[in-house]
Image (tube, rainbow, N blue to C red):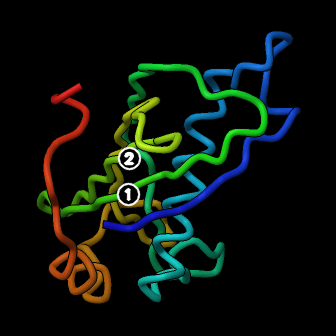
């Protein structure tokens, strides 16, 4: 499981100092890109890459509010389902779960048509440990 930290900024909050719901997907994206960096897969995030990962779907379940100044820990786990890659996320403040979510992705070639999962991604996903399904357990 991969861990990423994010300090909530003022511009990410509403007038009550609560993180606006739209920012949770941004936090997931930041954590997923950090995961790709850590796994040596960041090339798939670059425009000139031979393969890109299109977002097929996203889901967020909000459990408790994140607040201005909070240090959030975003946990990421990934697995393969055919050519799709599923990421699950859990956002915590201290040990309290604030939100859980998921994003599903598929590899596309430069012509934006589906392609086989690149070998480097397959290898990285085979090494991943999937602990539990957070979204359905919340």
Q: Residue at x 65, y 47 (%)?
A: 71
Residue 101 in the figure: left or right of residue 6: left
Residue 72 in the figure: left or right of residue 124: right
Element type where label 1 sits in the image = strand
Residue 117 numbered tag: none
Quarter occupied by the C terminus: top left
- Judge whether 80 appears above or below 9 on screen: below
Find the residue positioned furthest to the top: 16
- Judge whether 5 appears above or below 89 on screen: below
Query: Which of the two discs, 1 and 2, labels the residue nearer the N terminus?
Result: 1
- Judge whether 10 appears above or below 118 on screen: above
- Judge whether 123 appears above or below 111 on screen: below
Q: Residue at x 52, y 47 (%)?
A: 28
> Do tag 1 and tag 2 residues touch (Cβ < 8 Å)?
yes
> How dense is the environment of label 1, judged by Cα within 10 Å: few (below 14), some, or many (20 and up)?
many
Residue 76 numbered tag: 1
Q: Residue at x 23, y 39 (%)?
A: 134
Q: Residue at x 77, y 31 (%)?
A: 68
**Residue 26 spot, x, y in % from top left:** 63, 43
Residue at numbered disc 2: 89
> How dense is the environment of label 2, judged by Cα within 10 Å: few (below 14), some, or many (20 and up)?
many
Element type where label 2 sits in the image = strand
**Residue 70 spot, x, y in % from top left:** 68, 39
Query: From mark 1 to mark 2, how far is it between C-alphas?
Result: 5 Å
**Residue 63 spot, x, y in % from top left:** 42, 19
């Amino acid at each position: 499981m991969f861990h990423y930290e994010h300090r909530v900024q003022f511009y990410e909050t509403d007038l009550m100092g609560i993180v606006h719901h739209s920012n949770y997907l941004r936090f997931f994206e930041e954590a997923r890109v950090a995961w790709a960096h850590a796994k040596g897969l960041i090339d798939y995030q670059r425009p000139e890459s031979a393969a890109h990962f299109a977002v097929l779907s996203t889901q967020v379940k909000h459990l408790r509010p994140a607040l201005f100044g909070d240090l959030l820990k975003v946990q990421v786990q990934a697995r393969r389902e055919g050519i799709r890659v599923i990421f699950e996320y859990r956002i915590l403040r201290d040990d309290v779960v604030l939100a859980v979510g998921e994003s599903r992705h598929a590899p596309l070639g430069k012509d934006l048509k589906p392609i086989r999962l690149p070998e480097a991604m397959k290898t990285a996903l085979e090494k991943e440990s999937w602990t539990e399904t957070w979204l359905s357990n919340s």
